[in-house]
Image (spheres, helix red, strand yellow):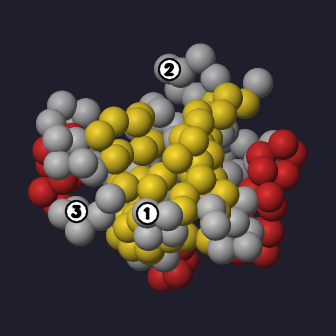
Amino acid sequence: MSMRLLFLADTHVPKRARDLRPELWEAIEAADVVFHAGDWVDAALLDELERRSRQLVGVWGNNDGDALRARLPEVARVELGGVRFAMIHETGAAQGREKRCAARFPDADVLVFGHSHIPWDTTAPSGLRLLNPGSPTDRRRQPVCTYMTATVGDGALRDVVLVPLG
């Protein structure tokens, strides 16, 4: 049986947007597990995601203060559908990222991260899949705001899709 996953990062609510877009809230409510890779900014968004998600996995980011850091880890780990996920906000420079992350997270199959607001989907030579969903509220130099969806089950991550937001 597969599970529907949704990946978010760098929401920066309420600094970059007052709230998440309605279509994103619908996708969050439909997902089996929601990952948020940090930079929430306000604990009110964490409260709302906890309320509206079936299961939430989150970490704090560099823009998250003491209230969020008290409730969230720097690194989260969870196994879903036979796939080992790790999540952290920041992984450093793009150059050498796969090698660095594979060395730091040798026990993970998938590493979810944020910070850059730039979508990323690569696989390290070790087999570690690295995913950054971009940002659903602050596109920076990207053409549109984004998040990611996927399915997981039977030991495999499938159907990874970068979802653009208008």
Residue receiving disc 1: 155
Q: Is residue 59 above or below residue 118?
A: below
Q: Amino acid at mark 2?
A: Arg
Q: Which quadrant of the view contains residue 144?
A: top right
Quadrant showing the N terminus: bottom right
Q: Residue at x 34, y 47 (%)?
A: 129
Tell me residue 136's x, y (percent).
65, 39
Q: Amino acid at mark 3?
A: Phe
Nearer-N-terminus badge (2/1): 2
Q: Residue at x 72, y 59 (%)?
A: 31
Quadrant showing the C terminus: top right
Residue receiving disc 3: 105
Q: Residue at x 57, y 42 (%)?
A: 159
Nearer-N-terminus badge (2/3): 3
Residue receiving disc 2: 141
Question: In the figure, is residue 165 to the left or right of 64?
Answer: right
Tell me residue 65's x, y (percent).
49, 68
The one of 88 and 68 positioned closer to us in this rendering = 88
SS for dot 2: loop
Q: Is residue 25 above or below residue 134?
A: below
Mark 3 Cα shell of 10 Å, populated few (<14), some (14-19), many (≥20): some
Mark 1 Cα shell of 10 Å, populated few (<14), some (14-19), many (≥20): some
The one of 53 and 149 positioned closer to us in this rendering = 149
How many numbered marks appear? Answer: 3
